[in-house]
Image: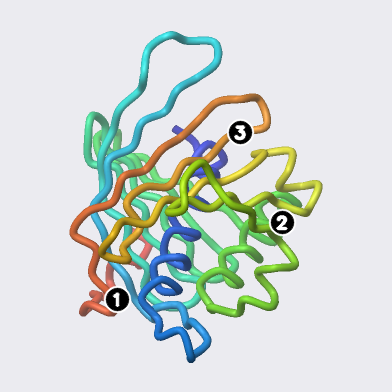
């Protein structure tokens, strides 16, 4: 799987982290994104052209603003890391690592910008990127991208918050109608994070 094909899942995970913190913040205080976050996830992708569901699982780690590690552990392994304006993806089973420059690609540059905004907790800036609407139930929200570059990738992101105030799932709907749903568990706010997780091998 290429770095480009991971971008929709990464954005869904970032928004989950943002909404998770907003739900846990006292109402009288402006929400602030966690400095660090870790969570296990299961992911299901439903493609318009296929009747089957593609299932996988892995772990998400935020290591501070602009730093993310998105690791797929099953059924195949891949590790995608974004650190500021650079990133890399590794396929351990094949011994292959590919680097990329977020600033060199127009779409990746916009996604990098979203990464920095969503992990900063700046809701004024986030509102410039997404329109927020109600969902199918009171616990759900819909985030609709405003920018043409992002609209070309997906039409909306749906987020559901459980009764405990923790994000239970995030679903991304691509521009072509495919859906990607991440279900989170073992969410930890500001856990110890090993900086070496973001080192390029």
Task: Looking at the picture, tell me which residue is in the foreground, 195 or 63.
Answer: 63
In this figure, which residue is indicated by the disc labeled 3? 174
Quarter of the image where one finds residue 45: top left
Q: Quadrant location of residue 96?
A: top left
Residue 159 x/y as whole percent: 47, 51
N-terminal label among 3 and 1:
3
Tag 1 residue? 195
Q: Secondary structure at mark 3?
A: strand
Give me the C-alpha separation between circle 2 and circle 1: 25 Å
Most extreme residue toward the bottom is: 28
Residue hosting label 2: 104
Q: Earlier in the sequence, mark 2 or mark 1?
A: 2
Q: Residues within 10 Å of mark 3 (few under 14, many from 20)?
A: some
Q: Position of residue 9 (x, y in %)?
A: 47, 44
**Is the residue 55 above or below the residue 40 in the image?**
above
Does 107 sit left or right of 1 as displayed? right
Element assignment for label 1: helix
What's the residue at 47%, 46% (across, down)?
Answer: 137
Q: Residue at x 24, y 63 (%)?
A: 187
Q: Secondary structure at mark 2?
A: helix
Q: Which residue is rendered at x = 23% and y = 75% of the image? A: 194
Residue at mark 2 to residue at mark 3: CA–CA distance? 23 Å
User: Which residue is found at the position 32% from the left and 52% from the top?
Assistant: 168
Which comes before the other along the chain, label 2 or label 3? Answer: 2
Marks 3/1: CA distance? 32 Å
């Amino acid at each position: 799987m290429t770095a480009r094909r991971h971008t929709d899942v990464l954005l869904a995970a970032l928004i989950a982290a943002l909404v998770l913190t907003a739900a846990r913040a006292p109402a009288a205080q402006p929400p602030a994104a966690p400095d660090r976050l870790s969570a296990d996830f299961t992911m299901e992708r439903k493609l318009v052209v296929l009747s089957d569901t593609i299932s996988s699982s892995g772990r998400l780690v935020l290591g501070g603003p602009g730093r993310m590690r998105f690791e797929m552990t099953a059924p195949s392994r891949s590790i995608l890391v974004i650190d500021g304006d650079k990133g890399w993806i590794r396929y351990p089973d094949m011994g292959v690592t590919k680097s990329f420059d977020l600033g060199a690609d127009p779409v990746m540059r916009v996604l990098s910008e979203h990464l920095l905004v969503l992990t900063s907790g700046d809701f004024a800036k986030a509102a410039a990127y997404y329109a927020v609407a109600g969902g199918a139930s009171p616990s759900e929200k819909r985030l609709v991208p405003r920018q043409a570059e992002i609209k070309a990738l997906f039409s909306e992101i749906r987020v559901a918050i459980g009764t405990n105030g923790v994000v239970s799932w995030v679903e991304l709907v691509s521009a072509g109608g495919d859906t990607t749903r991440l279900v989170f568990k073992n969410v930890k706010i500001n856990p110890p994070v090993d900086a070496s997780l973001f080192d390029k091998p």
